[in-house]
Image (cartoon, rainbow, N blue to C red):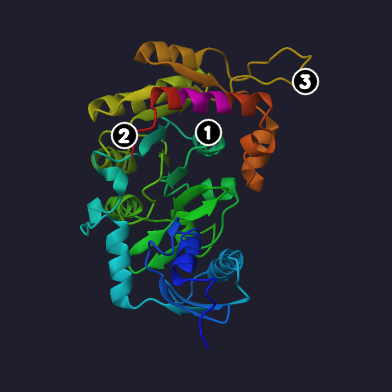
Amino acid sequence: MTANPQISREQVLAALRDVQDPELHKSIVELDMVKDIQIRDGVVSVEALLTIGGCPLRDTIQSSIEEQIRQLPGVRGVQVQLGVMTQEQRQTLITKLRGGEVSPMHRSSFLTADSPTRIIVVASGKGGVGKSTVTVNLAVALRRLGHRVGIIDADVYGFSIPRMLGLTGQPTMVDQMIIPLEKDGIRVMSIGFLLPNEGEAVIWRGPMLHKTLTTFIGEVHWGDDLEYLLIDLPPGTGDVSITIAQTLPQAPMVIVTTPQLAAVNVAQRAARMAEKVNMEVLGIIENMSWFQASPADPPVYIFGRGGGLRLAELLGVPLLGEIPLDPAIREGSDTGEPIVTSHPDSPAGRVFRQVAARLVERLPMKVG
């Protein structure tokens, strides 16, 4: 039996370049996952190697391979066999993904000076101002602008990002490399993915917090195409904030506050911390600025008025936006549908999109 002259191995390989590993976001050809190709009488047989035996997306990879090959002229059938990489093959893959670097704190591309990834640290002086809600909706807004976005949930004790995005499950581990979970194109890493249930308490001292955060930064494969990485800090100026400042000293900060004077005074402390560790403050976001029962009703300033602007003027930075108090924001956080997704044209949805656009203006993408 001879191979169908209409189909060549090169054609099949070229078609497979369009098949991406859904977690690593790279072609299976580029990742050396295609082990063998056989063609007999128009039937194409492909043997591909998965990174791990329990790969949760094996069916997606198999169907993508079949779909791409069936589009080739002359193909009468497709057979796909999935194997698993050896330890040596996985190590080669990990080294390639890390650009040849193997030391723990040089595994993430955004730690290098020429990284195309812009990092934005989202901070607040106190809890309850909606910092995590702001982080999630800004990530969705940046994604809607066409950017590739990631989130590190650095609020280890009070993690909430998974629920706000409707993300559950455990990250895939390829040896010591962690693959972040993804929702609507947003890559996410949170301690919530590593606990047995959402209600589990994290009772750690400083060294464990430090190790967790450096792992999220240095050992998670965020991909070399990530454009914006948002880091949701816990409130205050404690261990986590210090670790982020030490690990990512050039990362700029956005401060979230509410209009009331007490919140503004506490938020000012976060700005002072940024100043002491040489982190630039990009601007202020005022959350829960006013409530409007209907478009015909006048706004009601439940928490006072003008606090965000006062803080911005005090620090000499812009007020990036004033986000109204909207029950749909809370509802979206509970159901995993951020308001920028569920109600993008609502007053709050529009402000989030405007703030995202202003952040891009102040922190434009680098050329990777």
Residue nearest the viewer, comparing 189 with 103: 103
Distance from label 3 to label 1 (Cα)? 23 Å
At label 2, the amino acid type is Ala
Is 194 displayed left or right of 204 in the figure? right
Residue 79 can be seen, yes or no: no
Few, some or many residues within 10 Å of mark 1 (<14, 14–19, 20+) = many
The image quadrant where one finds the C terminus is top left
Q: Residue at x 47, y 13 (%)?
A: 309
Disc 3 is placed on an element classified as: loop
Q: In this view of the protein, can residue 322 be seen by the observer?
A: yes
Q: Earlier in the sequence, mark 2 or mark 1?
A: 1
Foreground residue, 76 or 266?
Answer: 76
Which residue range is magenta in the image?
353-359
Instruction: Kindly identify the amino acid type of the residue bearing the numbered disc 3.
Output: Ser
Task: Write down the residue under mark 3.
Answer: 294
For the residues marked 3 and 2, what is the alpha-carbon distance in whole angstroms? Answer: 39 Å
| Closer to us: 359 or 365 | 365
Residue lying at 65% horizontally and 41% vertically, measured from the top left: 332
Disc nearest the viewer among 2 and 1? 2
Q: Which residue is mark 2?
A: 251
